[in-house]
Image (tube, rainbow, N blue to C red):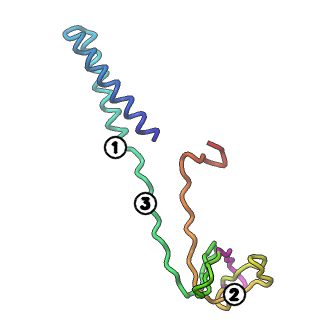
């Protein structure tokens, strides 16, 4: 949104510059204003060419009956049509070289290998931070 505001200001200034150039036509002031207007148009074209494109939308994951192979946050669904999927933190064991569901989530008392836990898995897609939120923990 900030970029659009800057482009609007530059466009409005160009209109005012064109009027001033007509008013001072033939004088050194008019010639100086023409140079400034030319530079301003170059700046605007730079802004347009380098405007940030919105990030591509994440491709939604598909439900997969194969167990996760890397740690992260996953949706888990038992396959029961009456049950809702749950987000589970999956960890990786360097000892067994497998992924497991950590204890302490949704009443899970013992860490369980994802292979034994069964069901369907889908990696949680983390949304990108919006510029309006702020960066490095700051509040915008």
Circle 1 packing at 10 Å, graded few (<14), some (14-19), many (20+), is few
Precedes in sequence: disc 3 or disc 2: 3
Q: Taking 121 as reference, is 107 left or right?
A: right
Which residue is drawn at the image coordinates 35% and 32% (left, top)? Answer: 43
Q: Taking 86 as reference, is 5 left or right?
A: left
* Label ID, residue 49: 1
Find the distance from the CA under tag 3 to the CA under tag 2. Answer: 34 Å
Magenta region? 87-98
* Label ID, residue 24: none
Provide the residue designation for mark 2.
113
Q: Residue 42 at what x, y percent from top left?
A: 31, 32
**In front here: 4 or 113?**
4
Number of numbered tags placed on the structure image: 3
Which residue is drawn at the image coordinates 78% and 76% (left, top)? Answer: 104
* Label ID, residue 56: 3
Residue 74 vertical position relative to residue 132 in the rendered view, above or below = below
């Amino acid at each position: 949104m900030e970029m659009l505001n800057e482009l609007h200001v530059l466009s409005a200034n160009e209109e005012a510059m064109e009027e001033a150039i007509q008013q001072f036509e033939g004088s050194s002031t008019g010639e100086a204003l023409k140079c400034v207007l030319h530079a301003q148009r170059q700046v605007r074209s730079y802004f347009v060419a380098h405007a940030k494109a919105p990030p591509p939308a994440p491709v939604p994951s598909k439900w997969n009956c194969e167990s996760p192979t890397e740690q992260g946050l996953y949706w888990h669904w038992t396959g029961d049509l009456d049950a809702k999927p749950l987000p589970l933190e999956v960890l990786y064991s360097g000892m067994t070289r497998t992924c497991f569901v950590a204890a302490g989530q949704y009443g899970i008392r013992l860490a369980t290998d994802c292979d034994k836990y069964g069901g369907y898995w889908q990696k949680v897609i983390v949304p990108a931070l919006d510029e309006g939120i702020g960066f490095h923990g700051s509040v915008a």
